[in-house]
Structures are given as C-alpha cells and as structure tokens.
Image (tube, grey):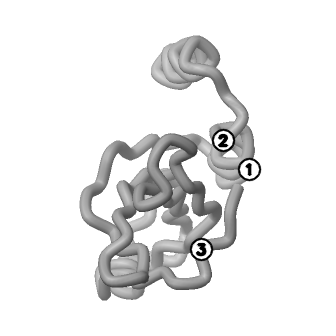
C-alpha cells in the first residue's frame, strides 16, 4: 500500500460519506492506482457496509478518480474492513474464491 499524498477526490466522496481505506499504485505503471473506499452506516438509508474500488490516474501530478471499478456489500462493517485490508495482498485466485464465498 502506498500513501498517495497528491490525491484529488470528487465531491461524491463527501456527499456519499465515503471513507478512503487504502490507496495502491500499480506496479507496472506509476501513473495508475487503485483506491479502496468504504461506505458505512453514516447514512439514513443505510443497509449494508460497502467496499468500493476506484481506478486512479495521475493527471498533472495528482491522482484523480477516473472510474468506479466495482462494489462489494457485506453484512457487517468488520467483514467489509477485513476484506479491504486483505484485498491488496490477494492473488487473483484468492479474490475469485473470496468473491464467490461472499455471494453465497
């Protein structure tokens, strides 16, 4: 995990009460990264904690969110945060198995 000091977040993060959990740089391209964000019980219409993955691109020296890649819902905040913490260390196979166990 890398601390991207120059990170520009869209206003949607504040409006949706999204919390940045981790930022990662892509090892094969220093201008690309991944942002892992959590959406928790801060809203009135709260149902399940959600982990959202966003593509980051470096634009004029600052990393900016350019696309939401995926979102995963969980039963508890603890499950969501455990997934977010494990995600940067998972292999593709681990991720496939984890996602299939989540959806059962």
Question: Is 86 rendered above or below residue 78?
Answer: above
Determine which quarter of the picture holds residue 11.
Answer: bottom left
Residue 34 appears anywhere in the view: no
Mark 3 to mark 1 CA distance (whole Å): 25 Å
Determine which quarter of the picture holds residue 2.
Answer: bottom right
- Upstream in the sequence, badge 1 or badge 2? 1
Disc number for residue 78: 1
The residue located at (45%, 41%) in the rendering is: 72
The residue located at (44%, 76%) in the rendering is: 43
- Upstream in the sequence, badge 3 or badge 1? 3
Residue 86 point in image, percent of width and height: 72, 38
Residue 55 point in image, percent of width and height: 36, 55
The residue located at (39%, 45%) in the rendering is: 71
Disc number for residue 88: 2
Along the viewing direction, whichever of 2 and 100 lies nearer the viewer = 2
Mark 3 to mark 2 CA distance (whole Å): 15 Å
Mark 1 to mark 2 CA distance (whole Å): 17 Å
Residue 77 appears anywhere in the view: yes
> Which quadrant is home to the N terminus?
bottom right
Pointer 3 with pointer 1, Cβ within 8 A: no
Q: Tell me: 3 left or right of 7.
A: right
Disc number for residue 4: 3
Pointer 3 with pointer 2, Cβ within 8 A: no
- Upstream in the sequence, badge 3 or badge 2? 3
Q: Residues within 10 Å of mark 1 (few under 14, many from 20)?
A: few
Q: Secondary structure at mark 3?
A: loop
**Front disc: 3 or 1:** 3
Along the viewing direction, whichever of 78 and 85 lies nearer the viewer = 85
Q: Residues within 10 Å of mark 2 (few under 14, many from 20)?
A: some
Q: Secondary structure at mark 2?
A: helix
Residue 51 point in image, percent of width and height: 50, 51
């Amino acid at each position: 995990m890398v601390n991207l000091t120059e990170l520009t977040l869209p206003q949607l993060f504040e409006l949706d009460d999204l919390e940045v959990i981790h930022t990662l740089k892509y090892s094969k391209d220093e201008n690309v990264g991944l942002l892992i964000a959590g959406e928790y019980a801060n809203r009135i219409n709260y149902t399940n904690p959600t982990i959202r993955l966003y593509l980051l691109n470096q634009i004029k020296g600052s990393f900016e969110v350019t696309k939401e890649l995926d979102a995963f819902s969980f039963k508890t905040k603890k499950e969501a945060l455990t997934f977010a913490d494990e995600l940067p260390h998972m292999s593709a196979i681990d991720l496939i198995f984890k996602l299939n166990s989540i959806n059962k």
